[in-house]
Image (tube, rainbow, N blue to C red):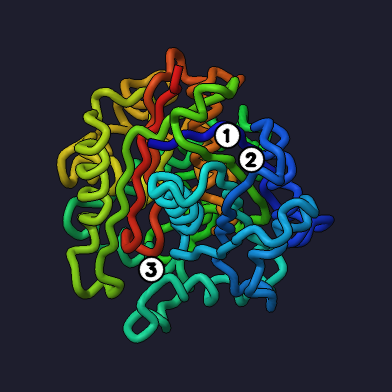
């Protein structure tokens, strides 16, 4: 069993003064200091980075800049599309569980704004099946625009539900000091196509799409027994990773079956159910993704996800708050950092340190982080250790 004992989180956004190198070293330094673990005691390092936005594609050693004591420690870059951060955390868990390491440092980071704006969408298409989907208009937004079209064809126009999801997450993000866009947007604004909110792909508007971001987040993990000696200890009670087919043509894409299976496996391992969770941080790269995730996690039946947002179930004071941090929609989505960020946001909640984001009496957190269109599916269930 493993636990998180310290963490760090940069501001997300267009960080012109930062490089990928400085983001990684800065987050690593802060996380180790916050945990109270000396760099010399770190046994292994995992760096989550999607890459492709700049020519540097071998960033694992950047973490050594945090301290000379990290030199010669094993450091490995991990990548699994937009679930890269969670992939790094699950790798760290495995190394600890196998007793190959005691203290593990995980850093997720991305410097997306280095790439020209007109190239970012195409770089993100590397998380799709290029042979069939590589020429999708609108880049990666076009992938989810197509998913939205298929969902609307099957269940009717859900534009208002998507607008409600965007408005909810922006409202939540107002209280997140790390968020890129701390601005409240009304349902009416999000649901109206305008010069300020144009159509991006399919039925998706600008307000339905997460932001291009720079940023980093980091955590320190160890075994649960060791974690009991530290002032902060958030236990990884259950987790699951399932990988689905890459081509959308190989599956019923509006069902997000990989997401559903990952949640079921994680609950089985944790001995929990959806009703036990205090809140969920889920992967809203596009609002249609959050809508489909309501259904895949079991919050609403297929085709009825709109009820969860329309009836306030997923509001911060609802029966299952979803994305009290503001999610990717408000916070931003620096690819390699996202999964680690979600775990930091959950840990803050469970420690009662989330300030304006705080969910009342938060005891059990669920996290869903996905790579591609529900291809790499990671679920973590966290609880405060004591």
Label 2 or label 1, whichever comes before in sequence order: 1
Label 3 or label 2, whichever comes before in sequence order: 3
Where 106 falls versus 60 (above or below)? above
The quadrant of the image that shows the N terminus is: top left
Q: Mark 2 points at which residue?
A: 179
Q: Mark 3 points at which residue?
A: 143
201 horizontally vs 313: left or right: right
Q: Nearer the viewer, residue 204 or 191?
A: 204
Residue extending furthest toward the front: 99
Q: Is residue 164 visible?
A: no
The location of residue 190, given as percent across then percent down, is 49, 44
Label 1 or label 3, whichever comes before in sequence order: 3
Residue extending furthest toward the top: 361
Residue for point 34% across, 45% down: 379
146 horizontally vs 89: left or right: left
Q: Can residue 169 be seen in this view?
A: yes
Q: Nearer the viewer, residue 102 or 46?
A: 102
- Answer with the quarter of the image where residue 313 lies: top left
131 horizontally vs 68: left or right: left
Crowding at dot 2, Cα within 10 Å, few <14 / some 14-19 / many 20+, comes out as many
Residue for point 44% across, 64% down: 80
Q: How far apart are marks 1 and 3 (CA)?
A: 25 Å
Looking at the rendered image, the disc whose residue lies closer to the viewer, 3 or 2, is: 2
- Answer with the quarter of the image where residue 220 lies: top right
Q: Is mark 1 on a helix, strand or loop?
A: helix
The location of residue 125, given as percent across then percent down, is 46, 74
Badge 2 vs badge 1, beta-carbon distance below 8 Å: yes
Residue extending furthest toward the right: 17
Q: Name the residue under label 1.
A: 173
Q: What element carries label 2?
A: loop
The location of residue 45, given as percent across then percent down, is 59, 54
């Amino acid at each position: 069993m493993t636990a998180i004992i310290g963490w760090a989180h940069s501001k997300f956004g267009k960080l012109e003064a930062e490089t990928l190198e400085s983001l990684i070293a800065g987050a690593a330094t802060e996380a180790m200091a916050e945990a109270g673990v000396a760099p010399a005691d770190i046994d292994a390092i995992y760096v989550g980075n999607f890459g492709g936005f700049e020519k540097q594609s071998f960033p694992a050693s950047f973490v050594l800049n945090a301290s000379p004591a990290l030199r010669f420690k094993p450091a490995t870059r991990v990548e699994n599309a937009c679930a890269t951060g969670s992939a790094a955390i699950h790798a760290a868990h495995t190394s600890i569980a196998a007793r190959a390491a005691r203290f593990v440092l995980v850093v997720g980071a991305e410097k997306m704004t280095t790439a020209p704006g007109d190239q970012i969408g195409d770089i993100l298409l590397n998380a799709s099946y290029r042979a069939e989907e590589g020429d999708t208009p609108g880049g990666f937004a076009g992938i989810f625009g197509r998913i939205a079209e298929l969902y609307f064809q099957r269940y009717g126009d859900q534009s208002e539900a998507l607008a409600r999801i965007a408005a909810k997450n922006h409202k939540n993000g107002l209280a997140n000091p790390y968020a890129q866009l701390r601005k409240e947007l009304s349902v009416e604004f999000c649901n109206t196509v305008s010069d300020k909110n144009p159509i991006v792909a399919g039925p998706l508007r600008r307000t339905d799409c997460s932001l291009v971001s720079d940023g980093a987040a980091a955590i320190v993990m160890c075994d649960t027994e060791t974690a009991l000696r530290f002032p902060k200890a958030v236990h990884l009670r259950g987790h699951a990773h399932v990988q689905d087919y890459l081509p959308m043509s190989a599956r019923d894409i509006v069902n997000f079956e990989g997401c559903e299976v990952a949640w079921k496996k994680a609950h089985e391992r944790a001995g929990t159910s959806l009703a036990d969770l205090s809140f969920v941080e889920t992967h809203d790269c596009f609002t249609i993704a959050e809508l489909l995730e309501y259904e895949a996690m079991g919050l609403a039946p297929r085709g009825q996800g709109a009820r969860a947002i329309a009836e306030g179930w997923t509001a911060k004071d609802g029966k299952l708050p979803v994305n009290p941090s503001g999610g990717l929609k408000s916070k931003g989505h620096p690819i390699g950092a996202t999964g680690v960020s979600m775990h930091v946001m959950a840990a803050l909640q469970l420690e009662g340190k989330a300030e304006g984001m705080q969910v009342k009496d938060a005891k059990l957190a669920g996290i869903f982080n996905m790579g591609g269109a529900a291809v790499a599916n990671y679920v973590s269930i966290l609880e405060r250790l004591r």
